[in-house]
Image (cartoon, helix red, strand yellow):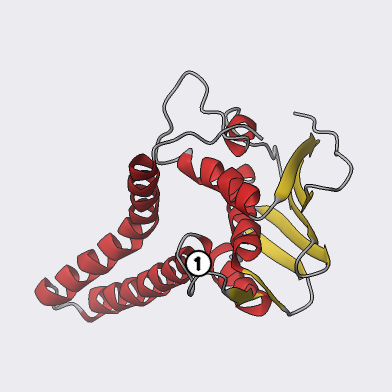
Amino acid sequence: MTGFALDSLDLAALLCSRVCHDVISPVGAIVNGLEVLEDEKDAEMRGFALDLIKKSARTASARLQFCRLAFGAAGSAGASIDTGDAEQVARGLLADDKTSLEWDAARVLMPKNKVKLVLNLCLIAAAAIPRGGVIKVKITGTEDAPHIAVEATGTNARVASHVPLLLEGNTGENSVDAHGIQAYYTGLVAQAAHLKLALTTATDSVRIEAEPETAPAMAATA
């Protein structure tokens, strides 16, 4: 991997922008629903507004819980995270009418950067199948030296052209924006966790693997 030279203030600002982008839509929907309740007398419309508020509140909560583990401190320095908690927040965010999540990992306490990496790989996988599909997460090996594989399968599955570069810390000729920062951050977390990434693509599937840096190099295709 390369240098990951983005300024720390820019990194923090862009990550905050990313989190705000994720939660502003459901929070805005809650505000709209409350405004309808204040002004609307029709029982059917009030029922619709209540349903909107409930659904949006669940969505906002799921996104915030996910972001807390994927981007937040999640405990003091050196803390571990329960992979069962990671599975729970991943299901809350990713599993819906279009996408299913298959999680194959023992429930253990794992160093937080490794768990954060799993969750961030899930975000990249979800973005690769905007029409929906299946996301498979498999974790083998030991807690300190895991092999992580996250695969997205769906119609026309693909990652944006800048993602492989950003996973390596290479911003190219363009500056990183609030959308690209997540892939850059994923590569940064992998580096901190002493894991190397390999991204492979096939017809209707995208697979990203992470394994200890001391393991034999894996081939990467785009």
The image shows a total of numbered marks equal to: 1
| Residue at figure coordinates x 85%, y 39% from the top left | 218
- Residue at 52%, 62% (x, y): give it: 70
The spot of residue 178 in percent (x, y) is 40, 41
The residue under label 1 is 66
Q: Is residue 90 visible?
A: yes
Q: Is residue 65 above or below residue 7?
A: below
Identify which amino acid the numbered label 1 is placed on.
Answer: Phe
Task: Classify 164 as above or below 43.
Answer: above
Q: Which element type, helix, strand or loop, lies under badge 1?
A: helix
Q: Quadrant of residue 89?
A: bottom right
Which residue sits at x=65%, y=55%? 193
* Residue 131 visible in rendering: no
Q: Is residue 38 left or right of residue 21?
A: left
Give the image location of residue 97, x and y in percent.
Answer: 60, 64
Residue 147: give x, y in percent of width and height. Answer: 81, 58
